Amino acid sequence: MLNKLFKTLFLLVITSSTLIAKNNVLITGKVIEKENGKALSFATISIHSTGNTVVGGTTSGNDGSFRLQNSLEGDFKIKVSFIGFKDTVLNLVVKNENSIDLGIIALSNDVIALKSAVVTSKVPIIEQKLDKIVMNVAEAVATQGSNALDILKKAPGVSVDPSGNILLNGSKVQVWIDGRPSNLNGADLESLLNGTDGSTIDKIEIIAHPSSRYDAEGSGGIINIKTRRNFAKGLNGSARSSYTSAPYKTYYHGADASLVLNHRGEKNNTSLTISPRYNEGFNSFKTKTYLGEENVVASNTLLERTQTYNSFKLSNDYYANQKNIFGFVVSGMLRNFIDSSDNNTGSQFFTNDIITHNVFTKIRNNSNFNNISANANYTRIFKDNQELTVNADYFYYDLGSDNNQMNIYKEPWGYIKKQNHFKTGSSQFINIKSFKADYEHLINNKIKLEAGVKWAQSTTDNTLVRLDNIENIWVKNQSQSTEFFYTEDISAAYLSLGGQIGKKITLKGGLRAEYTNSKGEWITADTTTTKSYLDLFPTFYFGYNPNKDLRWGLSYTLRVQRPNFENLNPQRFYIDATSSALGNPDLNPQYGHQMSLTLGVKRHFNFGFNSQFFNNVIVQTPSFEEETGDKLLTWDNFGKMNMVGINAAITEFPVIKWFILNANLSVANVNSSNNDYRKSSIFTNGNFNATFLLPEDTKIEFTGWYQSGIPYGFFNIRSNSDFSLGIKKGVLKSQGTISLFAGDIFGTNISRVNLSNNVFDKYEFESKYRSRRITLTFNYRFGQSKAVKQRKVGNMDEASRVSTGN
C-alpha cells in the first residue's frame, strides 16, 4: 500500500513538471560592490511577477556572476539583495528574447543595516543571534555520510542521555523539524534522527530561551532542524545513496537512500521526500549492582539489532493570490526492528566474591512504530508585516511490541535450579488533534506585536499482556498485565511585544498562559488520576549594540516539562534479565527558570553566562525487590536541579586562509538535590569543527565533542566523547558530491552511568552501540535551487511527548 502511495505521489510531481513554457530565457549578470568594485558572491537574485510572486531565483558565484534560466514572457522585476547592502530592483520586459545580459549590477552599502550586522561574503557555520544560535550545516563535510543525530551532537551544548533524550546544557529539549515537533521522545526520537539524512538539513536553530509564541514545553528549550526547500521554478531536487560498514568483531552493514523532488509552478510549490533505510547494529548493556558489602550482581546483555525504516513527506503551498496562501503537509513513517540476544547474555550473583548462581537469558523483541500526520494551514497577508496564520494538525500512532524472554537459573556447577520463561505483547494507540492561530503586526514600523491561541487534545490507549510459561502452559500474569488510558487537553494564549529603541537597544517581552486538564485511568488497578492547573510563562529579551563590534544580550524565560506518555504509563518494560522500568500516572510537571547574559565580540567571538533552576525534576528512582533480585526504575519527581555556568565560542575563525576553526566550550556547576540527597559537580561540554579547504572543490573536516560527568537525580552520568573525520569532493561540475565519513574513530562514544543511594551501595551501567562506522555517500543535485523562507506552519507540541523508549 505504501509503495503504491509513493509511486502515485512521484508520478504527480513528475507529470506537473512536463508543462511546456512559452519562452525559455537565459538571464546573466554580475554583482559587485559599488564602493570598491569587488565581486559579491552569494548575493540573492530573484524574479518577481507583477503580482509580486517569486517565480525564480539563484545566487551569484565566487566571481559575482550568475546565470538564471527560466520560462518567462511579459513584465517582471529582478531583485538583487545581500545583507548589509541596499536592494537593487530592475524592471524586465520579456518578449521573444532567448537571452538577456543585465551587465554589472553594483550594490551600495546600507549604512543603517551595517550598524547592527556584520557583513561577510560567506555564510558562517555558527551564528549567534539575540534569542538563538544558528548552525548553517548545509555545506559542511560532516553532513555528507552523517545522520541528523551525528550533526546534532556537534551543536554547542548538545548531548544525549542514556535513554536517547536530547539535552541542551544538561536539560531536556524538544526537537522540531521545519517548525513542527518531531513527534517523538527518548529512544524513538534517537531512531528518527539516526534515520534522517544529514545532507537534507539546511540549518539547526538552538533556541535555549523560546519566546511566548512557542509552547512552554521543554525545560531546556527547542532545537529546530530546518531541511532544504527551494523556490526555483520548474523541477529540481536531489538523489542520494550511501553504504555504511561498522568494523567490530562482526561487521555490521547499512544502506540508505533519499529522493527529494521540488516543483514550483505559477501558484504551487510542491515538495516530496522519500527515504528508505536498512541498518544492522547492536546495543550492549553492562550493569553491576552492589547490595551491601557482601552481595554483588553483574549483568551483561548484548542485543543484535536489525532495523528497516521507510518515511515520506509531501507538502504543498498554493498561492491563491499575493494575500492568501493555503498549504498542507502529510508525512508518514514505518519502522520495524528486531532485537535478539546471544548465548553470552546473563547475570552472575556473588556473595563474598563467590558465585552463588548464574542467570542465562535469551531475548527476542519485535517492535514496530507506525505513524501518519497531517497539517492544513492558511496564511492571510493583510499588508506588509501584518499577517494571520492558522494551523490544524492531526497525528496518529500505532505502536506495538512482542517480546519473548527466557531466564535460566543455574548453580555454579551447572545444575538448573529453575526456568523463568515469559512473553509480553504491548500495543499503544495515540491520537493528537490541535488547532492554532498566530497573528503578527508591525506597529509604526517599530514595534512587532505577536498574539495567538491554541487548543490541543491528546489521547493514548495502552495495553500490555504478560504471559508466563508454567509447565508448558501460557498463563496470564494478572499483576503485570496492565490497561491504561490517558487524555489531556491544553488551551493556551499568548501576547508578545518587541522592537528597537533607538539604534542600539532591542527589547522583547511576552506572557503565555496555558491551562491543562488531564485524566489517567489505570483500569487494571481501578485507579483514576485527574489534574487541572493554570500556568503563566513570562519571557524577556534585551539586546544592546554599542557599536558594530560588540553585542550584548540578556534573556529570561520560564519553561515546563510535562511527563511524556511513557513516563505516565504504568506498564513494566524489561531492560535485561534483572532490570525493568515502570511509569507513574501520578507524575507532576517539571518547571525551570532560565537566564542568560551573552556578549558577542566582532564576528568570531561569543561569550555567555547561563543559569537554570529546575523544580520537580522528572527522573527515574531506583528500587530493589529482595525476593526476585530485580532492579526497578520508576519515573518520579526527584527534587531540584540547578546549573550556573559560562561558555565561550569561536565561529568561522580563519587560522590561515585554508584552515577554518569553530569551537565551543561550556563550564557549569551542577547541583542535584532533594530532602534526603545532594550531589554537585563541575560539568564541562565542548565541541570543535576544523575545516581544511583544498583545491579541486575538496574539503576535509575533523570534528569532535566531549562532555564530562553530570549529576542527574540519583544518577551520575559519566564522561563521553566522539571524534570523526570526513572528506568531500565535488564532481560533475559541482552538481554531485562524493564523501567518505568515519565516525567515532577512537571508539570513545560509550554511555556510562552510576549511582549510590540508600537502596544501592553502588550501581554501574555501561551502554555501547554501533557508533564506530565508515560511510561512503554519493549525492546528485539536479535543477536550480535556492533556499526559501520557511512558512510558520504546523506548530504542535504534544506529539513531541510520544515515546516507546526504555
Image: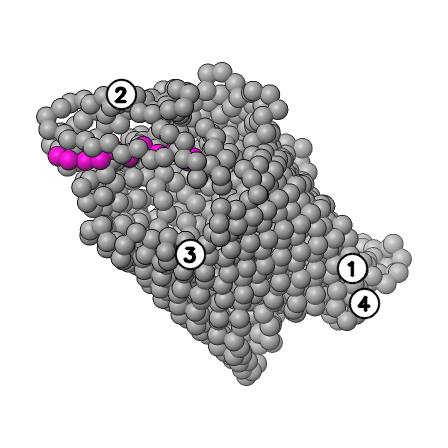
Crowd tier of the residue under label 3, counting other residues whose Cα lies within 10 Å: few below 14, some 14–19, many 20 or above: some
Q: Amino acid at mark 4?
A: Asn
Residue at image mark 1: 679
Q: Which of labels 4 and 2 is toward the front?
A: 2
Q: Which mark is residue 103?
A: 2
Question: What secondary structure is marked by label 1?
Answer: strand
Q: Residues within 10 Å of mark 2 (few under 14, many from 20)?
A: few
Q: Are marks 1 and 3 in contact (CB under 8 Å)?
A: no
What secondary structure is found at the residue carrying circle 3? strand
Q: Earlier in the sequence, mark 1 or mark 3?
A: 3
Residue behind mark 4: 758
Tag 1–tag 2 contact (CB < 8 Å)? no
Residue range (magenta): 74-84
Kind of residue indicated by mark 1: Lys
Amino acid type, callout 3: Ile
Q: Secondary structure at mark 2?
A: strand
Q: Earlier in the sequence, mark 2 or mark 3?
A: 2
Task: Residue type at mark 2: give it.
Answer: Gly
Q: On the image, which quarter does residue 493 sit in?
A: bottom left
From the top left corner, tell me how far across and down residue 591 is, in percent.
61, 66
Label 1 vs label 3, nearer the camera: 3
| Residue to which mark 3 is pinned | 447
The local crowd at label 1, few if under 14, some if 14 to 19, many if 20 or more residues have their Cα within 10 Å, is some
Residue 77: in magenta span: yes
Residue 77 position, x and y percent, is 22, 35
At x 48%, y 67%, the residue is 512
Mark 3–mark 4 distance (CA, rounded to whole Å): 56 Å
Magenta span: chief secondary structure: strand
Q: Secondary structure at mark 4?
A: loop
| Disc 1 to disc 3, C-alpha distance | 46 Å
